[in-house]
Amino acid sequence: MKLGKDYIMHSELALPYLETPEDHIIKTLETLQTKFGLKKDSKQKLIDLGSGDGRVVIYAGLNYGILSIGYEINPDLVKEALEHKELLKKEKKYKNKYLRKIKIKRGDLFTLNLKNYDFIYIYSLPTMQSFLHHVFKTAKSEAIFISYKYPLDQFETYLKLEYKIKHQTDNQENYSYFYRMMEKKL
């Protein structure tokens, strides 16, 4: 899909790249394993909507061995994530089978169908959350949404908050919120 410059610029302003610290990623994925059934080396799938430099996807793929896909609209961030993945290939400690499970793609999160994903990670500013209805409509029942830093309060018709964890960084508290996609009504 060809994305116009104006569209990309507007998307980047609405959802700028915001980095998730590595220790927060580790704690979040550990919580998925202990509370939400993430199984190492399983056929489960994780997607990061607006994956930035790919750190969530890369960590999940390398440490849990599940298919981990990141979608990012910014071509520079996609390039950075792919370069990071290439550097990892040169390190002998990473198994090639895990690196193959990491996919970084350029794309628009508002056009994706999420019916095949078990875990959906998103770091979205409250100002852009009103545009996320499509995201929830396409997700499968029982999928787990992880929202970093900002709760998804306005989506009670789709999601049920099941858990949250606190992250302490210097003198600042942040949270990861874990939601379960509710059963879809026919």
Image (cartoon, rainbow, N blue to C red):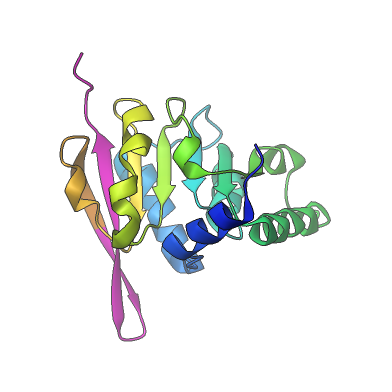
Q: Quadrant of residue 27?
A: bottom left
- Magenta stretch prevailing secondary structure: strand
Nearer to me, 118 or 154: 154
Locate the N terminus and report the quarter of the image it occupies. top right
Answer left or right for 126 relative to 122: left
Q: Residue furthest bottom?
A: 171
Where residue 114 appears, as percent x and y from the top left, is 44, 31
Using the image, determine if residue 27 lies above or below residue 132.
below
Where residue 170 appears, as percent x and y from the top left, is 36, 85
Magenta residue span = 165-186
Residue beneath the point at 16% across and 35% down: 157
Q: Is residue 57 visible?
A: yes
Indicate whether residue 151 is drawn in magenta: no
Using the image, determine if residue 22 lies above or below residue 136.
below
Locate the C terminus and report the quarter of the image it occupies. top left
Q: Residue furthest right?
A: 90
Nearer to me, 27 or 141: 141
Q: Residue furthest left?
A: 156
Residue beneath the point at 58% across and 51% down: 73
Where residue 67 appears, as percent x and y from the top left, is 58, 35
Nearer to me, 93 or 129: 129
Q: Is residue 139 visible?
A: no
Q: Quadrant of residue 149?
A: bottom left
Q: How many marks?
A: 0
Answer left or right for 81 relative to 17: right
Residue beneath the point at 40% across and 57% down: 123
Using the image, determine if residue 168 lies above or below residue 137.
below
Residue beneath the point at 42% across and 25% down: 115
